[in-house]
Amino acid sequence: MRIRPFILAATISSISASAFAADVANSKDVYGLWKVSGGTALVQITDCGDGTPCGELVHVDAPNAETLLDDQNPDPELATQPLIGSRLLWGFKEKSDKWSSGKIYDAESGKSYKSKLERKADGTLKVKGCIGPICQSQIWTQVEPN
């Protein structure tokens, strides 16, 4: 008989914790400043103007970051533009608890891939890039702007 109150309390705690985690995990709030996996760049995610997220490269850890060009970009006009300020994320659609059907641009290769964004329960951002059925994920960490 003494076990029942403990089980009930544990069950209620478990449900409350799960509900909280699910609420955070379901959050589509991906907006803010994010440090990419590896910590070598920062991406600012804002509203594209239509309620969907767009990401822009705002910082690169390189001695000459301000003079780096997006020289791998297949668009000749964009290849002469600074890398800082280039668009990296766009075209997302809401899908249950994440953003899908978007695009992510890899400035190192000059290629764009299908992408998904998902805010995890721990506050990190899971960023997926896909070529067909093969996907690769990174975990980005939110940082406070200076």
Image: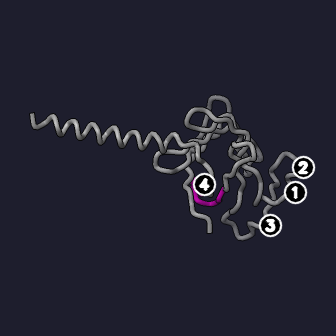
First in residue order: circle 3 vs circle 2: 3
Report which residue position mark 4 lands on.
36
Residue 66 within the magenta-colored segment of the rendering: no
Q: Residue placed farthest to the right in the image?
A: 77
Report which residue position mark 3 lands on.
67
Q: Amino acid at mark 1?
A: Thr
Residue 115 lies in quadrant: top right
Report which residue position mark 1 lands on.
80
Label 1 close to label 2 by CB (< 8 Å): yes
**Badge 3: how crowded within 10 Å, few (<14), some, or many (20+)?**
few
Quadrant of the drawing holding the C terminus: bottom right
Label 3 close to label 2 by CB (< 8 Å): no
| Residue 76 tag number | 2
Cα–Cα gap, marks 1 and 2: 7 Å
| Labels 2, 4: front one | 4
Q: Amino acid at mark 3?
A: Thr
**Part of the protein shown in magenta:** 35-43
